[in-house]
């Protein structure tokens, strides 16, 4: 082979499909490669490489006249993909054994295990690992050989484990992504290898050259994207359900954008061929799927959902989203969010775990306190955008009903965006960021399209009934005139209580905005705030949930009285005019603590104020 010519071709492909070249790369573009490193129980570090596969459009499937073609490879159709990362090798035994050691259960009855798991649906951190395999998982191969003999379910569970291990979103590639990566930016039958099957011996282990045995990864040449063994060695699980007519629906869209296969099915697709495959199975368009005989060596009845014993021809490689690749390599020690399969974001800080929800009450949190096992949220969740006002005007019934978009940021935070509409002359951006294992910062950014008179964002948190009483920091306690302290929201003050920043903002609270249906509220105006600092205390020894904000960012705190079934707290943010074209910001902080005294909570707030000042986080505009 003429290697000068080969590298010229690779360079041209890189230009065509968007690989940045030195000197002209966009600094915000994803890296062409990154190395992932994890640590096993013995303290050994294991690394693997992820290569960027550029987005683009290609013809998926095979034309009618391709030699070796099968009916399920058509009709050939146009597919458009966004960029993604793909591991340069098949998942190795070394890495898979680390997963097995950390997650395997001794229980043989996996149905019993699944039923136990179903009783704890909110345990988002749990990874139900595989039961012991019948026989030897390694099948006599060494650690640099591909992991093999796992079911699709087992491969998917590995991806969940790896996601939690690294803070990134790992998954199986879709069938379309796999074929695009295999083709290496070409339309050739064998991708970057070309159309001549004789050249495959340089890139692949298959029936003609493997000795009918499995080989260590990366023993042949990589394709144009730097991927080893995309054809041969082991078949590779992909995300999609298999259907022999699955391409017919995709072909109706021109192009079909980021397809993920049929919505349901009975078996899943495998791609790439194995060490015992004939050459026609190494074509980029060739499709495989789980066959009944694959679990013939499993003596269990019913068959295991985890293993295909002694089937050393089936493995997988992992994919990763570009938006998550910097989380581990560039983040601080603070916890991060992880994107889930449903469009939400999970977290486990070691103290708190839960989900930033994508639907229902938009962007509200579910949250559990791990040490105590207590569920913190109730109703519509914690820190959701509820009512939005200007002077004597309410925008819709609730901000949580508005369509929004979100993305995982490189530092592991989440950014959500609510666009302006003809009925809403402003856009809202929200940044959710963990400051520590028990401290969450929410930054609300408002960009005014037109003048906003006395603009207000009413940020709502609904707690579990374990937290029945609110305590608000006021400047003048009713029973101790001239003394500041925390006032419990007792029913004698009124069912619904509003604590203003100062007397001047009372006029804004009473300008008619709270008389507008649905669910108008008559607030009992309470003593002025000492600071925007409020908490709900558990009746028994345990966690306290504190909400706080810089004084300039929050002009009132609201709560129902003790015992009212909402168990809620509300922060009224901004409370000022915003000129057209201006941008304003407000911060809110949630702290979960075991503080036992009011003084400790005040000290938490003082530390928070110092940190906000040191970060120069006061409002701008």
Image: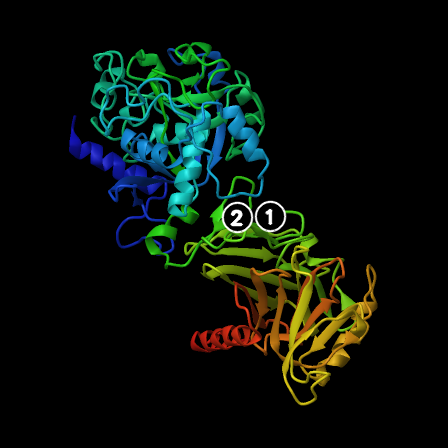
Q: Is residue 169 above or below residue 610?
A: above
Query: Disc 2 designates what residue?
Result: 345
Can residue 59 be seen from the camera position used here? no
Q: Please state which of residues 46 and 257 is positioned toward the viewer in this rendering.
A: 46
Callout 2: 10 Å neighbours few (<14), some, many (20+)?
many
The earlier-in-sequence mark between 1 and 2 is 2
In the image, is 301 to the left or to the right of 252?
left
Which residue is drawn at the image coordinates 37% and 26% (left, top)?
187
Q: Is residue 516 above or below residue 213?
A: below
Q: Position of residue 516 (x, y in %)?
A: 82, 65
Q: In what quadrant of the picture does the C terminus appear?
A: bottom right
- Determine whether the residue tagged by mark 1 lies in a helix, strand or loop: loop
Q: Position of residue 235 (x, y in %)?
A: 36, 21
> CB atoms at circles 1 and 2 under 8 Å apart?
yes
Q: In what quadrant of the picture does the N terminus appear?
A: top left
Q: Which mark is residue 122?
A: none
- Determine whether the residue tagged by mark 2 lies in a helix, strand or loop: strand
Q: How is the image coloured?
A: rainbow
Q: Is residue 545 above or below residue 131?
A: below
Q: Quadrant of residue 291?
A: top left
In the image, is 416 to the left or to the right of 172?
right
Query: Disc 1 designates what residue?
Result: 358
Q: Please state which of residues 64 and 546 is positioned toward the viewer in this rendering.
A: 546
Q: What is the distance, in whole Å, between disc 1 and disc 2 at their CAs?
A: 8 Å
Which residue is drawn at the image coordinates 78% and 68% (left, top)?
496
Can residue 352 be seen from the camera position used here? yes
Callout 1: 10 Å neighbours few (<14), some, many (20+)?
some
Q: Position of residue 431 (x, y in %)?
A: 52, 60
Q: Please state which of residues 422 and 115 is positioned toward the viewer in this rendering.
A: 115
Q: Position of residue 103 (x, y in %)?
A: 40, 35
């Amino acid at each position: 082979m003429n290697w000068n010519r080969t590298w010229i071709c690779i360079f041209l492909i890189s230009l065509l499909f968007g690989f940045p070249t030195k000197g002209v790369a966009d600094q915000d573009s994803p890296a062409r490669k990154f190395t992932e490193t994890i640590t096993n129980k013995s303290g050994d570090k294991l690394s693997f490489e992820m290569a960027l596969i550029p987005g683009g459009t290609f013809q998926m499937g095979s034309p009618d006249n391709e030699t070796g073609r099968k009916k399920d490879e058509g009709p050939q159709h146009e597919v458009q993909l966004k960029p993604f990362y793909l591991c340069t090798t098949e998942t190795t035994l070394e890495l898979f054994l680390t997963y097995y050691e950390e997650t395997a259960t001794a229980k043989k009855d996996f149905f019993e295990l699944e039923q136990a798991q179903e009783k704890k649906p909110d345990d988002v951190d749990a990874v139900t690992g595989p039961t012991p395999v019948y026989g030897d998982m390694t099948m006599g191969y060494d650690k640099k050989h591909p992991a093999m003999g796992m079911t699709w379910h087992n491969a998917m569970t590995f991806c969940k484990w790896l996601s939690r291990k690294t803070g990134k979103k790992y998954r199986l590639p879709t069938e379309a992504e796999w074929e695009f990566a295999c083709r290496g930016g070409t339309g050739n039958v064998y991708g970057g290898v070309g159309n001549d099957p004789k050249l495959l011996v340089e890139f692949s282990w298959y029936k003609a050259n493997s000795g009918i045995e499995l080989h260590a990864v990366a023993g042949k040449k990589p394709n144009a994207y730097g991927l080893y063994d995309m054809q041969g060695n082991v078949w590779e699980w992909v995300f999609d359900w298999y259907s022999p007519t699955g391409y017919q629906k995709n072909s109706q869209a021109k192009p079909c954008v980021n397809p993920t296969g049929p919505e349901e099915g009975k078996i899943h697709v495998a791609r790439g061929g194995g060490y015992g495959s004939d050459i026609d199975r190494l074509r980029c368009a060739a499709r495989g799927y789980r066959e009944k005989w694959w679990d013939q060596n499993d003596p269990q009845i019913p068959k295991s959902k985890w293993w295909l014993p002694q089937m050393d021809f089936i493995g997988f490689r992992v994919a990763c989203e570009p938006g998550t690749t910097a989380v581990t390599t560039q983040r601080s020690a603070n916890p991060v969010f992880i994107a889930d399969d449903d469009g939400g974001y999970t977290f486990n800080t070691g103290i708190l775990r839960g989900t930033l929800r994508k639907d229902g009450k938009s962007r509200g949190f579910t949250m559990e306190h791990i040490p105590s096992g207590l569920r913190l949220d109730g109703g519509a969740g914690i820190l959701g955008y509820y009512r939005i006002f200007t002077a004597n005007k309410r925008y819709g019934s609730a901000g949580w009903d508005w369509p929004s978009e979100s993305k995982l940021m490189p530092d592991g935070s989440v950014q959500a965006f609510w666009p302006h509409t003809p009925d809403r002359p402003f856009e809202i951006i929200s940044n959710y960021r963990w400051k520590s294992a028990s401290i969450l910062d929410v930054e609300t950014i408002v960009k005014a399209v037109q003048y906003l008179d006395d603009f207000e964002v009413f940020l709502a948190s609904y707690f579990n009934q374990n937290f029945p009483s609110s305590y608000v920091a006021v400047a003048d306690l009713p029973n101790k005139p001239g003394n500041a302290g925390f006032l419990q929201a007792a029913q004698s003050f009124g069912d619904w209580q509003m604590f203003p920043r100062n007397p001047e903002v009372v006029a804004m609270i009473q300008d008619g905005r709270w008389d507008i249906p649905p669910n108008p509220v008559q607030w009992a105006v309470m003593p002025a705030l000492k600071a925007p600092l409020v908490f709900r205390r558990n009746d028994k020894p345990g966690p306290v949930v504190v909400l706080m904000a810089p004084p300039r960012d929050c002009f009132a705190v609201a709560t129902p009285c003790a015992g009212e079934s909402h168990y809620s707290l509300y922060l009224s943010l901004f409370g000022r005019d915003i000129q057209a074209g201006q941008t304003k910001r407000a911060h809110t902080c949630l702290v979960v603590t075991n503080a036992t005294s009011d003084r400790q909570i005040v000290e938490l707030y003082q530390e928070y104020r110092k940190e906000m000042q040191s970060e120069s986080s006061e409002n701008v505009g």
